[in-house]
Image (cartoon, coloured by chain):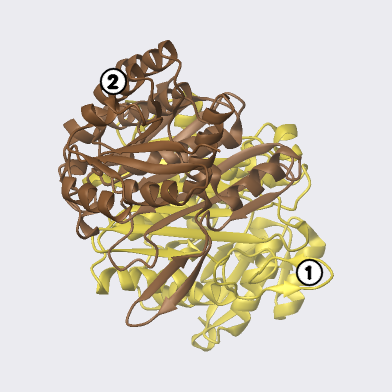
Amino acid sequence: MKKLNFGIISYAHPHALRYGQTIAENRKARLYAISGDGANSGVAKGEAKKHKAKFYKDYESLLRDENVDAVYVAIETYRHKEIAIRAAEEGKHILLEKPIALTLEDADEIIKTAEKNDVKLMVPFNPRFTSPLIKAKSMIDAGEIGNLEYINAISEYVKPPIYLQGLDMSWFFDVKKSGGGGFMDTAPHGIDSLLWLTGSMPKRIFADIGSKIYGFPVDDVGTAFLEFENGVMAILSAGWGNPKGYPYGLEIKYYLVGKEGFLDVRTAYPDFAVYQDKTERIYWERPDVQGIVNTFIESILKDKEPPITGKDAKNNLIIVLSAYESSRTGKVVKL
Amino acid sequence: MANGKLKVGVIGCGNIFNLAHKPALEKIQSIKVAACMDVDEERAVKGAKYFNAKAFVDLNEFLDLDLDVVEILTPTYTHAELALAALKRGKHVIIEKPIALTSEEAEKMIKVAEKEGLKLFVGHVRRFDKRWVQIKDVIKNRNILPMQIKKNEVQGLPFPSDYWYWDESKSGGVALDLGVHVTDFLRWLFESEPVEVFGSGKMIKEQARERNTYDHFVMMIKFEGGKLGIAEVSWAYPYPARYGVFYHHLDIIGKNGRIRYTPMDTPVVGVAKSQFEMPRFSPLLSTFPDAFERELRHFFECIREDKEPTVSAKDALIALKIAEKAKESAKLGKSVEFGGGEE
């Protein structure tokens, strides 16, 4: 069977490291080419060498390579539109890092161009691909906790990007490039899981997001209240809330309250602990990135709609931007 | 003060008396429970017998006694009337939270206590709970500087729908009854004043729908200096009813660190039998029994030595006002300013 040839455009987003590895290990895919646009181009070049992939200095030459079937785009968010549109025009399927774009208009253009050129467009949100959350969702759908009433997304926190070593993360602190700080960085994952678990869209949002902890020029943590059309209420706290010494780099937890049962998702990412001069938690399972890559490949090979479409990603962005609006104005935002 | 002991009279010999105050009062040597009053004679007699005290069903006869302190452990809607009556008869008052059903009532109680030169203490027992006291110390000693605090106090309220808790005109609903615990807690840990309050509620259990009162309520409270308090209070958690399990979860994010607490990660008691039972501290109670004892010892000491308490009636009033604002916000569907009325 012919393997799908993947290109990775940019290592500006550190997720590219994990995606590169995961694509390279996938039986149905080959990490064929990498381009070094944006931040961390040196890292991109090194990864190309490591994975024996072609290295292109810029995405335009990668996109013109006829052997490339699909691209994973991890460039700074403000360049998503420019690159996604060109990729679609060149007939490449697109796995586009979140958030889909800086604005809803940009998101619309990306979605339209992908449709016009008949390429798959998927935006990766991780929690719904983790085994604890898949289990929780199946229990909810089977009615095991009765009607779902309330979700406390306790923690969608990571450490701030300043603690990532060997990578240039400065664009995360430039709102013109990233669209926002910690909340923009992590909340889309939590929001996607809420959309997925409830199967509904929010109708009211109240949020407080700010540069509260570190004094960065962008926000670090935020909390949003969401009331969904189907009556589910949710609280989502997200951002760069984990201090340097926190044993988890990434932590996602939920309390799910049904009318007849309570689900305690203590972590979406199962781990074990290593104790030395500090405590470290090591994940023994990260099925999320694998799941994302697998379903994306499957949607291409079987010509199916990906589980998370451009429209889903746009809805996600609507909610994130509404939360920022609520925080800015101090008012409840109705959708 | 016979034999140097404070003479205490108790009004209300129901759940909180039997589960929390009775065992605490029993351990305190510096006081003597001289009288127990309840509208239910059987309960009054039972309580009085326990302390070898006099039983009353009539408030005036009860207040005729030479009492130093009256402890009021009755449903919330009766607090103001009973406290005012006791204060006007020259008794110091210790009252369960919430201070009163409305802030107007609470303000009147505070004014009368001041005018009469008497103490009015409110049982905000969280401030005497080892966990929170120690966390407060750690915040201070390690300069955590909290900026966002999320506090959840949740349970499955085991009472039937005709119980007074489910009657909003008697209890104020969960937003008030548990809400004042959390609003006071947030203000205590932040050491800041609230500026804006958002609230939203749901009716989940049958009792709540039947009595048309929220049994699940969340608040987002903005404090001075960009601090955010998030409160979740609930009677609707589908925990086994047998023990009325009560859970606290706490997550503090500060400029210099994060503090998390949940009994789900560090259960005090976990029981595995034929059916799994959730960890618990004590039946029905939201805190350790000794927190009540510490609270009462502190209040009695403040009365005897004429000292200011750790938590004042004014603190209790502000906690109540925040909860009232949250209820108002839920009604209006928008956030409301604290202090200055609507936005």
Question: Disc 1 marks which amino acid?
Answer: Val
Chain drawn brown, letter?
A
Which of the 4 image quarters holds residue A304?
top right
Q: Nearer the viewer, residue B167 or A64?
A: A64
Question: Disc 2 marks which amino acid?
Answer: Arg
Is A315 left or right of A184, judged from the image as shown?
right
Q: Nearer the viewer, residue B194 or A285?
A: A285
Identity of the residue furthest to the front in this view: A1
Q: Which mark is residue B82?
A: none
Identity of the residue furthest to the top in this view: A116
Q: Nearer the viewer, residue B151 or B83?
A: B151
Chain drawn yellow, letter?
B
Q: What quarter of the picture does the C terminus of chain B occupy?
A: top left
Position of residue B127 measured from the top left corner of the image (x, y, whole percent): 43, 66
Secondary-structure class at tag 1:
helix
Residue B159, above or below B70: above
Does the rendering let one see residue A66?
yes
Category of crowding for the residue at label 2, using alpha-carbon neighbours closer than 10 angstroms: few (below 14), some (14–19), many (at least 20): some
Category of crowding for the residue at label 1, using alpha-carbon neighbours closer than 10 angstroms: few (below 14), some (14–19), many (at least 20): many
Is B343 left or right of A250, judged from the image as shown?
left
Q: Residue at x 76, y 45 (%)?
A: A144
The residue beneath circle 2 is: A86
Is B172 left or right of B339, judged from the image as shown?
right
Chain hosting mark 1: B
Secondary-structure class at tag 2:
helix
Identity of the residue furthest to the right in this view: B274
Does the rendering let one see residue B102?
no
